[in-house]
């Protein structure tokens, strides 16, 4: 069966290769293209795309269709387009760690990657990229082998760093660490620019250097940009699971030495809320309010609403009810009263819930605010329904 498939593909390729200008993409399974590549002694060029990717469509129209690009790629590679969100593309995206689109892969017949690039390339860039992929001494595979063999020269590391970053293979931060280790002074404009531009996760000593030398980077990029960079690295690491919840405390201590305890406690509360874990949220929220009593009324109201939203245990709900009462006493606003009414309804005290909801509506009418949520709460109670 395999031989039949390969024979069919060879015949298909010989007919299809003259059908149009530009790159000729095979309509075949990835494994079949690899088998054909082994027979022909060629690399496989993979256009890893998605339906929603604008640059992917632009490359289809303006680059892959060009005769010069087609002549070069049809001569030197077997080419295939794979949607990374459909069919076999889903598993391939995971295997090849593809997170950016388009990703342009050059794959050996055994499935290993000879070279890769993430992002748009114009016609000239595609020709250059293909040439580099064919260069057994300078493609990403070759550079990786030299690195594994112990090459640590500064010029080599800089070249490897560029190829790794452009290829989005996930190795560039480690390479950057090794490159900076060859530099006596990290305070040069080049070193700071490389660190600030290429650092994309906090699980590196380079992140600690950025935090500890924040003012040096602020002189170049501005305080808000540096602050946003640090914050993005921290929260992306947590949201993507690169840093586990158990390690969140340590990460916040590294990123925000003066505010770490409060930020870590707040993150745990938000984490459980996003997971819709009522028990975890209640425990984290109670600890947060206890340890940081100076939080504002608006935040306290938001936390109380979180209890209404996902917490079922009555003892915990009564704790939130006390906070909601406190918020109303200090700020007799519509939102605070609506939250209090909702909590009364959830613990089964419908009479008090209706009374407070009507109070909330009266307050809203005075200011012209929307009170539809309170009206809906009253209607649900009266109809004997549970508000979702």
Image (spheres, grey):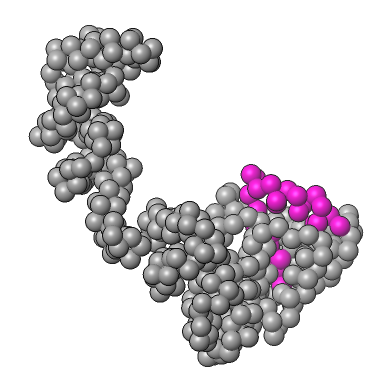
Depth check: give the residue in front, 88 or 266.
266
Q: Whole-percent x and y of residue 229?
A: 47, 58
Q: Quadrant of the N terminus?
A: bottom right
Q: Whole-percent x and y of residue 315?
A: 10, 34
State whether residue 45 appears in this view.
yes
Q: Toward which corner of the image does residue 300 lie, by quadrant?
A: top left
- Magenta stretch: includes residue 184: no
Residue in view at x 57 percent, y 70 percent = 193
Depth check: give the residue in front, 187 or 53.
187
Is residue 188 found left or right of 277 in the rendered image?
right
Is residue 388 found left or right of 125 in the rendered image?
left
Is residue 277 found left or right of 60 in the rendered image?
left
Residue in view at x 38 percent, y 15 percent = 370
Residue in view at x 73 percent, y 76 percent = 132
The magenta stretch spans which residues?
A: 43-66
Q: Toward which corner of the image does residue 248 lie, by quadrant?
A: bottom left
């Amino acid at each position: 069966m395999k031989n039949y498939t390969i024979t069919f593909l060879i015949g298909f390729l010989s007919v299809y290769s003259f059908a149009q200008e530009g790159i000729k993409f095979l309509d075949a399974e990835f494994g079949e293209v690899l088998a054909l590549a082994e027979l022909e002694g060629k690399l496989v060029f993979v256009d890893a795309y998605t339906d929603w990717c604008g640059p992917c469509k632009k490359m289809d129209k303006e680059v892959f269709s060009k005769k010069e690009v087609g002549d070069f790629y049809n001569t030197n590679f077997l080419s295939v387009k794979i949607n990374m969100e459909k069919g076999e593309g889903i598993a391939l995206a995971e295997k090849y760690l593809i997170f950016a689109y388009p990703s342009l892969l050059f794959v050996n017949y055994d499935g290993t990657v000879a070279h890769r690039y993430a992002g748009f390339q114009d016609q000239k860039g595609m020709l250059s990229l293909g040439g580099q992929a064919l260069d057994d001494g300078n493609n990403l595979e070759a550079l990786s082998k030299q690195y594994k063999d112990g090459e640590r020269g500064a010029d080599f590391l800089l070249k490897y760093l560029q190829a790794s970053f452009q290829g989005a293979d996930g190795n560039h931060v480690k390479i950057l660490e090794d490159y900076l280790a060859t530099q006596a002074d990290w305070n040069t404009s080049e070193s700071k620019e490389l660190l600030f531009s290429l650092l994309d996760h906090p699980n590196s000593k380079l992140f600690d250097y950025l935090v500890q030398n924040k003012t040096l980077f602020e002189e170049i990029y501005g305080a808000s940009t540096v602050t946003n960079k640090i914050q993005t690295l921290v929260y992306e690491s947590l949201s993507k699971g690169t840093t586990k919840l158990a390690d969140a405390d340590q990460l916040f201590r590294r990123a925000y030495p003066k505010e770490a305890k409060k930020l870590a406690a707040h993150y745990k509360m938000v984490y459980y809320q996003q997971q819709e874990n009522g028990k975890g949220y209640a425990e984290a929220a109670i600890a947060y309010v206890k340890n940081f009593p100076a939080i504002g009324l608006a935040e306290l109201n938001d936390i109380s609403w979180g209890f209404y939203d996902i917490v079922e245990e009555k003892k915990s709900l009564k704790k939130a009810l006390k906070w909601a009462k406190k918020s109303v006493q200090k700020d007799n606003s519509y939102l605070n009263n609506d939250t209090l009414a909702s909590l009364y309804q959830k613990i089964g005290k419908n009479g008090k819930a209706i009374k407070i909801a009507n109070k909330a509506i009266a307050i809203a009418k005075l200011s012209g605010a929307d009170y539809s949520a309170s009206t809906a709460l009253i209607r649900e109670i009266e109809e004997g329904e549970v508000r979702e």
